[in-house]
Amino acid sequence: MGSNSFYVKGWSVTLVAALFALAAKDANKNYVLISCIPVPIFWVLDAYYLSLERKFRKLYKEVVAGRVADYVMDVSSYKSHNWTSCLFSISVWPVYALIILTTFCVMFLLQ
């Protein structure tokens, strides 16, 4: 799950950088505005992967403690680690906040 989160962050930065390059080439700030659409989607997807990772870690701890049978991969009973609680995790929100802040700075500079 950690590698999925890493890939989502990488794709987010790559896509936004490509849209910034298009905006700089054509001097068109509409490309920068388009980059505001995928960033929240990647943010939610990253939070979802983090919530899954936390649920599987909790399941692993319970299997080690002997409270859950081996080879049970059902994490639906762990409601405390939902994706909305992971949106503002320290490993998720700074990356996307920085991307959004950079987007607004680029929009301001292209005016």
Image (tube, rainbow, N blue to C red):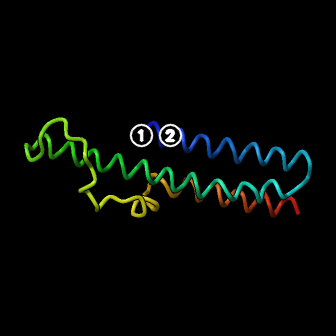
Residue in front for this viewpoint, 76 or 104: 76
Amino acid type for the residue under numbered disc 2 = Phe
Identity of the residue furthest to the right in this view: 26
Q: Which residue is mark 1?
A: 2
Residue 21 in picture, x, y percent from top left: 81, 44
Neighbour tally class for label 2: few under 14, some 14-19, many 20 plus, Cα within 10 Å: few
Which quadrant is home to the N terminus? top left
Q: Residue at x 44, y 52 (%)?
A: 48
Q: Position of residue 93 (x, y in %)?
A: 51, 58
Where residue 102 sits: x, y (%)?
Answer: 70, 56
- Tell me if label 1 and label 2 are in contact, CB under 8 Å: yes
Residue 31 drawn at (x, y percent) = 81, 53
Judging by the rendered image, the residue that carries numbered circle 2 is 6
Residue situated furthest left in the rendering: 66
What distance separates the C-alpha of mark 1 from that of mark 2? 6 Å
> In the image, is 87 to the left or to the right of 80?
right
Q: Residue at x 9, y 47 (%)?
A: 67
Residue 3 figure quarter: top left
- Left or right? Give the position of 55 relative to 2: left
**Mark 1 secondary-structure assignment:** helix
Q: Residue at x 19, y 35 (%)?
A: 71
Neighbor class of circle 1 (other Cα within 10 Å; few <14, some 14-19, many 20+) is few
Circle 1: residue type: Gly
Label 2 sits on a secondary structure element that is helix
Q: Is residue 24 above or below residue 87?
A: above
Quadrant in the rendering for residue 68: top left
> The C terminus is located in which quarter?
bottom right
Judged left or right of residue 109, residue 92 is: left
